[in-house]
Image (cartoon, coloured by chain):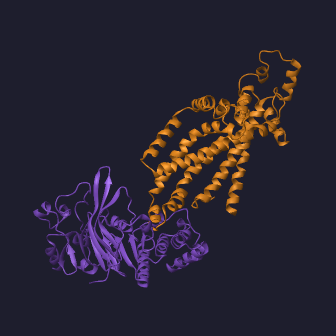
Chain colours: A purple, B orange
């Protein structure tokens, strides 16, 4: 019997009820995050990775979004079905979440210090002065130079990297057990990106919090994650240890993504790309949703939906009839 | 704070050209009006020629336009704002009339701001539901109806038929005598404020920082107040500020319908009598008040939106 995971998501499905019909944005996603572990969800825009994160956080815009199936457990406690008031005591306290663009994710008319202090005042009922000191302390922890002086500055007065640090400070203020980072470095320069990732890794080592990293950047996954999930069209198509998946993908989609990454050592005139475009969620594709873009697809792929996420080898699951072939193809 | 002070001072300097421009323009327009003011005054009766000559002299009516205008300016700088043909001083008129207009304007403003913002927020939070549709339809009706129609209907219904409010005049004093004209005066702007608030709040509620606030586990009321309203009221305050300034200028139609002796009524009768001095004096005072209110609103932005810099 293994220990209870920090976060366990079971068979999650999220529907969007739009004017044009019901769209399934996330379908049957299951995964776990353990304390101190970093799990990455990799996928392109519209793959459902952000929706999965928002569902875990309980901040889906509903309507139109609705969790139609599945359960979410935090340390074995079911979050799905909890009344809103109890969920509020989880958000920001036990689970923190940082977003892609810290400029639009921070309130432009409140000073950054107040926005951090709000966590202490709202959740711990601290007084004004005490919350202020705590906020300055956490600003120092995320290495904001001159934290005390910058307490009353507004978001627009900070650089992109500093704003993301503010965001991180705000969300680690109450020492959550789990931090969800939704594309935390996408809007940043490469050098700043590295600093932010290093900061996240450092905080994680200090506090042993779990990190759920949502990204489309294979480099970020390689640098940060122990385990990874690859999502395509709302489904997990492959999951396993990050190192192993990146070295030797078992799903043709993952394999194609990896081939599209430019190599530092080889000169290529034209990078390989994945033909076609992501499916329109309003028009479900018969059979495996990746088959129109897939290199190894056979006739059966357009007739039968992809298999269930299957154990391909130890600690590796993939949703493809030809997973074994893809896996060994990567070896040769 | 020093920056804000300098900004206010620089804005204050603008009052100088505006003062000369307004007085000159209005004086010129009054001069250009057809007809002899004194002939209008004595219509149908034979006035004493000696008295008419005295008035000609008193009001510089024989002088060319520029001389008249300069004499008028000279009077202002020596503290003489001029007087009506009946001999009442403009300063006296202003002191008598402006408080009435001010009471009417502020009462209307309270209705406009409280109801407009309140219903606007309510409608935004219930988007697509009954109250939202009702408020949109209602405000569309208010925008479409001419103000004098609304005025007479309100007067007939609430004044004559139901007798809830005085039909006209201000003898009942504030607030009873002012409520009905103020509501009618506020109606049009109220509709705009309502729609602006609703639209602005709906846009704000879609912002990323609202999602952040929810991720922080803040209660809905805090999210609405500190995140939603603080950000969405900036355009509403712009509109309200400009409208407050406009309300201070008096309301000719409403003051006429409800017989409220404010600045609007006075201006109307003075324009008809050709009392240039009165019109110029009152209009200039109103323009200055308009600019002052606008300056206050501009300074208020800085409080609401820290991204605004005074340069």
Q: Quadrant of the N terminus of chain A?
A: bottom left
Position above or below: B157 against B8 = above
Is residue A101 toward the left or the right of residue B153 in the image? left
Q: Which one is nearer the viewer's eye here, B37 or B197?
A: B197
Number of dots carrying numbers = 0
Position above or below: B183 against B45 = below
Position above or below: B63 against A152 = above
- The quarter holding residue B264 reads top right
Position above or below: B149 against B311 = above
Q: Quadrant of the C terminus of chain A?
A: bottom left
Q: Position of residue B259 (x, y in %)?
A: 69, 31
Q: Position of residue B296 (x, y in %)?
A: 67, 52
Looking at this view, name the residue that lies furthest to the left.
A299
Is residue B221 toward the left or the right of residue A26 in the image? right
Look at 14% across and 63% down and name the residue there: A301
Look at 72% across and 44% down and name the residue there: B288
Q: Is residue B1 visible?
A: yes
Is residue A245 toward the left or the right of residue A87 in the image? left
Q: Which one is nearer the viewer's eye here, A194 or A12?
A: A12
Looking at this view, name the residue that lies furthest to the right.
B50
Look at 53% across and 45% down and name the residue there: B194
Q: Is residue B311 visible?
A: no
Q: Position of residue B225 (x, y in %)?
A: 54, 59
Q: Position of residue A38 (x, y in %)?
A: 35, 78
Q: Which one is nearer the viewer's eye here, B270 or B193?
A: B193
């Amino acid at each position: 019997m293994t220990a209870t995971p920090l976060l366990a998501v079971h068979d999650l499905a999220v529907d969007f009820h739009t004017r044009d019909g019901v769209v399934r944005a996330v379908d049957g996603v299951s995964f776990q995050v353990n304390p101190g572990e970093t799990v990455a969800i990799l996928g392109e825009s519209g793959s459902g990775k952000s929706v999965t994160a928002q569902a875990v956080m309980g901040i889906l815009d509903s309507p139109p979004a609705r969790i139609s199936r599945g359960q979410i457990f935090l340390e074995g406690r079911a979050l799905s079905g909890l009344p809103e008031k109890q969920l509020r005591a989880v958000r920001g306290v036990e689970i923190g979440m940082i977003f892609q663009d810290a400029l639009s994710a921070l309130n432009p008319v409140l000073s950054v210090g107040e926005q951090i202090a709000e966590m202490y005042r709202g959740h711990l009922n601290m007084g004004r002065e005490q919350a202020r000191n705590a906020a300055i302390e956490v600003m120092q922890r995320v290495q904001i130079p001159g934290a005390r002086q910058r307490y009353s500055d507004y978001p627009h007065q900070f650089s992109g990297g500093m704003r993301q640090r503010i965001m991180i400070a705000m969300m680690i203020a109450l020492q959550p057990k789990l931090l969800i980072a939704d594309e935390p470095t996408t809007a940043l320069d490469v050098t700043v990106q590295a600093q932010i990732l290093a900061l996240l890794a450092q905080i994680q080592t200090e506090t042993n919090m779990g990190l759920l990293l949502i990204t489309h950047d294979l480099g970020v996954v390689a640098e940060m994650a122990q385990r990874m999930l690859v999502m395509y069209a709302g489904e997990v198509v492959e999951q396993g240890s990050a190192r192993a998946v990146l070295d030797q993908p078992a799903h043709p989609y993952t394999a194609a993504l990896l081939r599209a990454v430019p190599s530092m050592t080889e000169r290529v005139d034209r990078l390989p790309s994945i033909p076609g475009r992501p499916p329109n969620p309003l028009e479900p594709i018969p059979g495996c949703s990746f088959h129109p873009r897939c290199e190894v697809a056979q006739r059966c792929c357009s007739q039968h939906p992809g298999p269930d996420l299957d154990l391909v080898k130890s600690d590796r699951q993939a949703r493809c009839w030809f997973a074994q072939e893809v896996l060994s193809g990567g070896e040769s | 704070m020093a920056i804000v002070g300098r900004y206010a001072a620089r804005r204050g300097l603008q009052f100088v050209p505006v003062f000369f421009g307004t007085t000159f323009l209005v004086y010129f327009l009054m001069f250009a009006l057809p007809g002899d003011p004194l002939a209008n005054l004595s219509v149908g009766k034979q006035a004493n020629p000696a008295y008419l000559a005295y008035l000609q002299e008193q009001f510089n009516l024989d002088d060319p336009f520029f001389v008249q205008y300069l004499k008028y300016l000279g009077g202002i700088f020596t503290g003489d704002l001029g007087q009506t043909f009946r001999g009442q001083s403009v300063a006296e008129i202003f002191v008598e009339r402006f408080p009435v207009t001010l009471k009417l304007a502020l009462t209307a403003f309270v209705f406009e701001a409280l109801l407009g913002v309140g219903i606007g927020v309510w409608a935004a939070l219930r988007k697509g539901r009954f109250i939202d549709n009702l408020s949109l339809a209602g405000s569309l009706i208010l925008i479409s109806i001419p103000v004098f129609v609304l005025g007479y209907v309100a007067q007939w219904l609430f004044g004559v038929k139901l007798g809830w409010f005085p039909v006209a005049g201000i003898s009942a004093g504030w607030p009873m005598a002012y409520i009905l004209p103020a509501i009618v005066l506020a109606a049009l702007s109220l509709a705009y404020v309502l729609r602006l608030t609703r639209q602005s709040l709906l846009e704000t509620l879609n912002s990323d920082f609202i999602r952040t606030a929810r991720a922080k586990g803040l209660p809905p009321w805090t999210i609405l107040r500190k995140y939603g309203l603080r950000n969405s009221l900036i355009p509403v305050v712009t509109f309200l500020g400009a409208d407050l300034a406009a309300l201070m200028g008096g309301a000719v139609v409403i003051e006429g319908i409800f017989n409220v002796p404010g600045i609007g009524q006075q201006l109307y009768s003075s324009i008809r009598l050709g009392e240039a001095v009165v019109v110029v004096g009152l209009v200039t005072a109103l323009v200055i008040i308009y600019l002052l209110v606008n300056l206050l609103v501009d300074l208020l932005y800085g409080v609401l939106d820290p991204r605004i810099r005074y340069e």
